[in-house]
């Protein structure tokens, strides 16, 4: 009898693998790796259908981008406004998302009244803020950024000047963590900072503090690495090594505010490296990107996120999904876009250039119609294979050896228009993938 049950169990186990297919969302793929994948959210966008569809469809964790900061929650002493933050937290919980609390004690977005308190008052205001906010959200927050950005940039390794540092001395960080543990013993307590993503003097200083806290039993569970990257602050070569050395102290590590300025393949590769670094560190428990769409990013000009301003998946999205082991069925819909500019003009003619750019997946061919306005005539073309309609006004341009474009990559073709006294720009049709 026992033997039979055992045999059935073995059969059941053998039958199960192989039926799973790759997850098709960031959250699903991250979950299969035992991680969460989150986004920073603004209350102002909670009513925008496209925003919500991406948020709900792709992410299983959220952070309020501004609404849980001190100035939002306690703008005047002991007068707390939780309404807007509650909307964000309630939304996350209603969709089974975990919620990161950001942030309890930070020198920035700090209401003026805090800075004008004397030391004793400041200490009690700080502890009261931590306690009141954490009790309000008790049981609802996965991880809190208890203290944010307490160290100086550069090589000093010193603490940053702030009302807390200047009036309370070094002990205020430890005190904040002890107060936080008492207020919500179920929440993970994180220290969060930027420019600490690689091994450097600032991350060394944070490391020394965390090691000291662990040695002395000061409650700390996690360290957040904001990971705001651009060409001045690229993804460090020792990113993974840095995450690992913190994890080796016995804390979880989280990537808390990821964004990388750039576009196309280069941006996608940087995102891939970040995801791979997290996956290589077993205590790297999740990744949060600092926004859903480029259009609402705090650095929107740098297009640093995974969805463009129209909520299309960018090459970076596909790179992240693939690095997490997921797939949305071949890299998304093949598409292309066009732009036009006049490049030269003479007394009787002008040259135009059309740039063809692949969307978020690679394409192998493209087709664009260019319509000139009679009595204009196209007298020359280059970098493409043209055909003409019977009127001679509509040219259909196809590639001439330049049809294969990787995701986000571009090519261009050109033509000369004899104006015949009509200087109107040609009409450029939509780009088709063929
Ligand atoms: O809501 C007001 C609006 O009413 C007003 O008209 C407008 C005029 O300036 O300001 C709006 O508030 C802005 C707020 O973002 C919401 O858009 C603030 O001025 C602006 O300072 C604030 O910026 C935030 C910044 O923190 C403040 O330090 C960014 O959105 C937010 O992304 C950014 O997030 C920080 C993290 O908390 C910590 N790590 C760095 C990260 C990036 O700076």
Image (cartoon, rainbow, N blue to C red):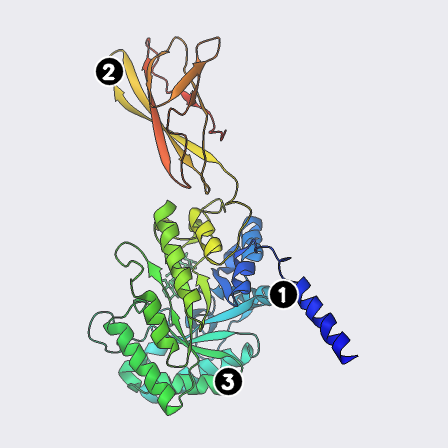
Q: Which mark is residue 346?
A: 2
Q: Nearer the viewer, residue 74 or 311?
A: 311
* Disc on the earlier residue, 1 or 3: 1
Dot 1: element = helix
Residue ID at (29%, 81%): 208
Picture coordinates of residue 282, whole percent (x, y): 45, 72
- 244, 108: nearer the viewer: 244
Measured as percent of width and height from the top left, residue 345 is found at 26, 19
Is residue 11 left or right of 234 when viewed as pictured? right
Figure check: 333 above or below 282: above
Identify which residue is drawn at 20% across, 72% down: 155
Residue 113, position as x, y percentages in the image: 37, 76
Q: Is residue 46 visible?
A: no
Return the mark for residue 183.
3
Residue 269 in the image: above or below residue 65: above
Q: Is residue 322 visible?
A: yes
- Mark 2 → mark 3, Cα distance in angstroms: 75 Å
Q: Is residue 87 above or below residue 177?
A: above
Q: Specify the quadrant of the image occupied by residue 271.
A: bottom left
């Amino acid at each position: 009898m026992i033997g039979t049950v055992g045999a059935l169990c073995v059969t059941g186990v053998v039958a199960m693998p192989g039926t799973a297919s790759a997850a098709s969302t960031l959250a699903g793929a991250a979950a299969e790796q035992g991680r969460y994948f989150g986004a920073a959210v603004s209350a102002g966008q909670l009513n925008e259908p496209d925003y919500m569809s991406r948020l709900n469809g792709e992410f299983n964790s959220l952070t309020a981008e501004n609404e849980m900061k001190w100035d939002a929650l306690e703008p005047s002493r002991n007068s707390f406004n939780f309404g807007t933050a509650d909307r964000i937290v309630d939304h996350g919980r209603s969709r089974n998302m975990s919620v990161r609390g950001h942030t309890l004690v930070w020198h920035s977005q700090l209401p003026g009244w805090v800075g004008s308190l004397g030391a004793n008052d400041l200490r009690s205001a700080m502890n009261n803020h931590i306690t009141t906010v954490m009790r309000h959200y008790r049981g609802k927050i996965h991880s809190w950024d208890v203290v944010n950005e307490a160290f100086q940039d550069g090589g000093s390794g010193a603490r940053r000047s702030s009302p807390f540092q200047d009036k309370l001395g070094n002990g205020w960080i430890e005190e904040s963590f002890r107060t936080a543990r008492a207020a919500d013993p179920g929440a993970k307590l994180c220290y969060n900072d930027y420019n600490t993503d690689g091994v450097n003097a600032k991350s060394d200083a944070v490391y020394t503090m965390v090691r000291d806290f662990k040695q002395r039993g000061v409650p700390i569970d996690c360290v957040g690495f904001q990971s705001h990257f651009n060409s001045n602050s690229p993804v460090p070569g020792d990113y993974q090594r840095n995450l690992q050395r913190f994890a080796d102290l016995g804390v979880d590590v989280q990537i808390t505010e990821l964004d990388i300025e750039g576009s196309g393949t280069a941006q996608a590769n940087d995102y891939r490296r970040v995801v791979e670094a997290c996956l290589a560190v077993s205590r790297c428990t999740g990744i949060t990107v600092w926004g859903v769409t480029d259009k609402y990013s705090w650095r929107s000009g740098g297009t640093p996120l995974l969805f463009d301003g129209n909520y299309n998946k960018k090459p970076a999205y596909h790179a992240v999904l693939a690095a997490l082991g997921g797939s949305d069925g071949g890299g998304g819909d093949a598409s292309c876009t066009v732009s036009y500019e006049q490049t030269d003009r003479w007394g009787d003619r002008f040259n135009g250039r059309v740039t063809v750019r692949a969307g978020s997946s690679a394409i192998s061919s493209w087709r664009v119609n260019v319509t000139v306005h009679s009595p204009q005539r196209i007298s020359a073309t280059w970098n493409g294979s043209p055909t003409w309609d019977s009127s001679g006004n509509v040219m259909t341009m196809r590639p001439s050896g330049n049809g294969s474009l990787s995701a986000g990559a571009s090519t261009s073709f050109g033509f000369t228009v004899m104006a015949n006294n009509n200087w109107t720009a040609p009409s450029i049709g939509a780009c088709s993938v063929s």
